[in-house]
Amino acid sequence: MLKTSNTVLHGRRGRYMDGTTSIRLGLRHCRTSLTDKTHLKDSASRRRTFSAALQQFEEQMKAAEVVSPATRPINLYYGLVQAGLAITAAHAEGTWTFDKHGLKIRDMKCAVPDIAVRPEGVGAFQAVSDATGSVRTTEAISLGALWNSLPELVEVPLDGTNDTPVIDLLARDYASSGDSGEWLSINTKPSEYVRATVWVHEEMPLLPHRKAWVQAFINKYEGLLGAGLWGDEDEAFEEVRPGCFSVELCWPASRNGMQAAEIEQFFDARAPVYRFNAHRYLRPAFEPAKAPPTPLMSWWLLLYSFSMLARYQPRKWADALDIDRSPNAAALEYALNAALEVVPHLVLEGLHQKPIPLSKPFAL
């Protein structure tokens, strides 16, 4: 029997299956396991809609696997909408149905990274955002910015995209003594720190410019506010490979002797675990003083936009996918392939209303 309350979905025999198969099995299991834990128990209409919507989601995802990138975003997006309807049927208070997208693209004639999607009225996007605890965006967001905010896509950038990227963060599982390190944010050193390493996909700044770079870098990510360098500008930076380097950062511990659970909560508030155990990411904000939409809703915005291009600008979409002429063709193909794996996982988490990080290998 699958158990999604643990960090892996597992059974009795200790065998292994790949993550995609396990996620699909988990989605099938939801058809019965959520009935008594959600609003489904109170309404036959919700239960029937939930079942039919998840069936359509599964079939749209299967269809997306066999069609080419020319058509795939249509299946992916409409499958995701049906999954969203299942989520609202199970979890939304009050009104749980919708009949509009709740989104709008003003101009589809500009370059793909510059196309911007914005909310309009109340529809599927708003309903599912509310049901899954995602921040409602109110401003237009470019596809380039959405792309760079998603961990699966940031290392395969769209040509012409210069938006702030998501970055990897490795959290330490302890509070370490603060007898070394230059603290950039405050004058008085605390006795203990919480530490983390971040990986940045750009050329490492030269030594004389690193202090200014760190201060500007921290301001781009809400999760880094209050951080400083661990060590001086020389020892805190390390080149990983050309175009990628790591930076050691730290925060003052809330108290001496913080426990592992407290440190985990500290990092959960700044860079939640995403899809795999211990994988944390800092995502850039799209609007001042507001967290970005969750990865599920960011993928929603991206796939809506791709589906609109495929449906209403098929020649433009075909040109963007022309592998012999378009500099973005390979990246777009990659994103659509990634969505086949990522979207079902995020939908499963949305249905359960909690993270379900995978292990490698994935145990059953």
Image (spheres, rainbow, N blue to C red):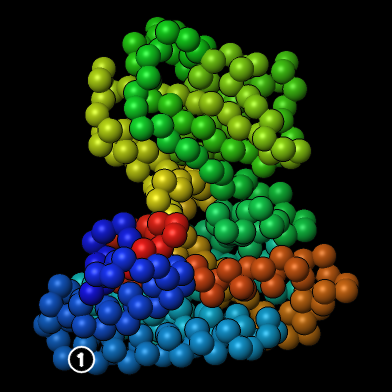
Residue drawn 24% across the image and 92% down it:
48
- The total of numbered circles placed on residues is 1
Can residue 93 be seen in the rendering of this structure? yes
Can residue 225 be seen in the rendering of this structure? no
Q: How far across and down, in percent of the image, does residue 86 sit?
A: 32, 81
Q: In which quadrant will I find the N terminus?
A: bottom left
Q: Secondary structure at mark 1?
A: helix
Amino acid under disc 1: Ser
Above or below, 240 against 339 in this view is above
Quarter-of-image position of residue 235: top right
Quarter-of-image position of residue 161: bottom right
Q: How far across and down, in percent of the image, does residue 277 sit?
A: 40, 51
Residue drawn 50% across the image and 26% down it:
249
Q: How far across and down, in percent of the image, does residue 242 sit?
A: 76, 38
Quarter-of-image position of residue 216: top right
Residue drawn 82% across the image and 77% down it:
322
Label 1: how many residues lie within 10 Å, few (<14), some (14-19) or many (20+)?
Answer: few
Q: Say which of 58 and 20 sits in front.
A: 20
Q: How far across and down, in percent of the image, does residue 290 sit?
A: 43, 47
Task: Point out the residue furthest to the right here.
Answer: 325
Above or below, 148 against 72 in this view is above
